[in-house]
Each structure stands twice: as C-alpha cells, then as structure tokens.
Image: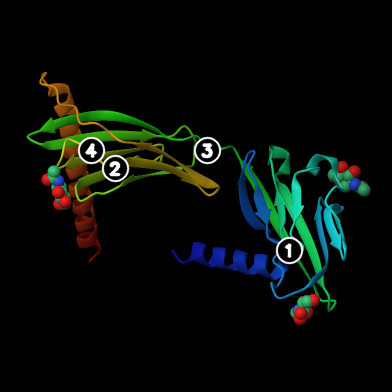
Amino acid sequence: MKLPTNVFFFVTIIQVALGKSPRQVFGSLEGSITLPSGADPSWNLSSIEWSIFRNNTWIATYRIPVLNIKRIKRYDGRLSLDITSGDLTINGLNKEDNMVYTVDVINTKGEDSSNRIELTVNPRLQPPTIKTIASTSVKGVCVLVLNCSAVDKDVSLSWQVTHSSEIIFIKTNPDGNSAVIGAFLNTTQNLPEFICTSSRNTGSVSTVITPTCEVDELPQLTRYRHVMAFCVGVFLGSFLTVLIYYVKGKMCE
Ligand SMILES: *[C@@H]1O[C@H](CO)[C@@H](O)[C@H](O)[C@H]1NC(C)=O
Ligand SMILES: *[C@@H]1O[C@H](CO)[C@@H](O)[C@H](O)[C@H]1NC(C)=O
Ligand SMILES: *[C@@H]1O[C@H](CO)[C@@H](O)[C@H](O)[C@H]1NC(C)=O
C-alpha cells in the first residue's frame, strides 16, 4: 500500500514547483479576516497591490505615499491595508468574498514578492446545545450525564470541566454532531462548570452550564437507566476496542 503516499508526494511536489496552490484561509460570515501578504517582515514596502480575478482587478493598493482602498464598490468601507506588513483585512465577510486574492509587493530596494490566498467564508457557528440526560445524587455522589449537540456540520465537539478531580467519561459521536459526558462528582453542591466547545477551522464557540444535582426522592429508575446505559456503553466500547486491537495484533503476528 505504498502507492497513495507516493502519489500524494508527487502531487505536492508538482504543486510546490508550479507555485499553483494558493494558501487557504477561512473566515466566518460577517466576521473579519486578515490575508497575509507573505512579504519578508524586514522589508520596507514601497508598493502593495492586492487584486482579484484573472484580469488582476485591483481592490487595494499602496504606492508610497498613496493608499487607495476604495477601488471597488463592493469592498468599500470593508478593507484596511497594513502598509508595514502588506496584510489586507476584509471586514463584514460575505459569500461573494470567496475567491483567490493575489498580492504583489515591492520593497524600497526594488525587490518584489507575490502571494496568492484562497479565502473560504463559512457560515457562522451556532453555539452547541447542552441537555441534561441524567442528574442524580447517590449518597453524596452526584452522577451526571450531559449531551452536547451542534447544528453545524463538520464541527468537532469537545468537553471541559472547570476543576475536575472527579471521574469523567467522554464519548463522542463519530459524526461529530454530539458528544456525551458522564461524571461522578464527590459533591452535590456548587458543581463545576461544564463547557462544550464546537470548533471548526474558522473558529469555535462554547456553551457553558453549571448543572445542578437533582436530589429528589422519587423513584429514579429512568435516570438510573440512562446512567447505567451510558456506563455500560463506555465500558463495553473500551473493552471491545481493546479486544479488537488484541485480536488484530494476534492475527498480524
Ligand atoms: C527601513 O526604513 C527605516 C526607516 O526609514 C530604516 O531605518 C531601515 O534601515 C529600513 N530597512 C530596510 C531593510 O531597508
Ligand atoms: C475583470 O474580470 C471581472 C470578472 O471576470 C469583470 O467583472 C471585470 O469587468 C473585468 N475588468 C476588466 C477591466 O476587464
Ligand atoms: C472532592 O475531591 C477533591 C479532590 O479529590 C477535594 O479537594 C474536595 O475537597 C472533595 N470534595 C468533597 C465535598 O469531598
């Protein structure tokens, strides 16, 4: 199975050799993004030209000492150009900003460099939703099972607990759209904060809750059922994984 690696290797070499693959950057709808000029930071720039399209339509230019960031109507009021670094910031991103941007810079000694950047604008991330599946106290120990889910696709979800000397299990759904945390806490009062973060290459957004441990005397069979199902799931899952690796290991010997 050496072939795919080699193919990727050659594709990479070809792309690098031709200088054809623009650098990828990701922004969020209505957010801001800074496109790096890639110019040597020690350079004193005398000319900066940011352009779009095959016909190199200028959108922002600087030619010592004139700065012009009002060249195209649809970018009007949304651009700022850093004349030291050559970096271009676009504010109020929209879907039409998805394209390849080209920058050409010249320094005071007449040396030049250029860079191409492909901008992808993604919809804004929605904060994930946390639902309490089970919350119960058993002899001073609080047993919690929380589910975190995201409406956005292609995000990864992660859990954090503010101070966790407690026993914590985390189980993430393979599709990344939900993540379950199970916790055994040694207290039923002043529970720690549980933070679920939904992240993507464009950024991340979190939801925080401070759960309460329900101490009701009603039959808790339903809750126990959830807790038990979760624990059994986690243990069985780990056990099976270990078993599969073990069996695979044996078979490959
Ligand atoms: C850049 O300009 C500053 C001030 O004009 C000068 O001191 C410095 O030597 C210049 N650097 C280069 C690399 O030309
Ligand atoms: C450059 O290309 C864009 C899109 O293809 C077009 O809208 C624009 O009119 C062109 N500008 C010139 C000066 O040809
Ligand atoms: C819970 O455990 C932590 C660390 O083991 C300890 O510092 C804390 O005092 C314990 N809380 C209670 C209520 O026992």
The answer to which of 35 and 41 lies nearer the viewer is 41
Up the image or down, 196 lies above or below 81; here it is: above
Query: Does the beta carbon at disc 4 come under 8 Å from ligand 3?
Result: no
Residue 117 appears in the picture as rendered:
yes
The answer to which of 30 and 20 lies nearer the viewer is 30
Which residue is disc 2 drawn over? 171
- Residue sitting farthest toward the top: 218
Question: What amino acid is found at the position of numbered circle 1 in the picture?
Answer: Asn
State which tag comes first along the sequence, 4 or 3: 3
Under circle 1, the secondary element is strand
Which residue is disc 1 drawn over? 115
Residues marked 3 and 1 touching at CB (< 8 Å): no
Who's the residue at 46% across and 35% down the image?
127
Label 3 environment density (alpha carbons within 10 Å; few <14, some 14–19, many ≥20)? many
Under circle 4, the secondary element is loop
Instruction: Tell me the CA gap for discs 4 and 3.
Output: 30 Å
Instruction: Tell me the CA gap for discs 2 and 4.
Output: 24 Å
Under circle 3, the secondary element is loop
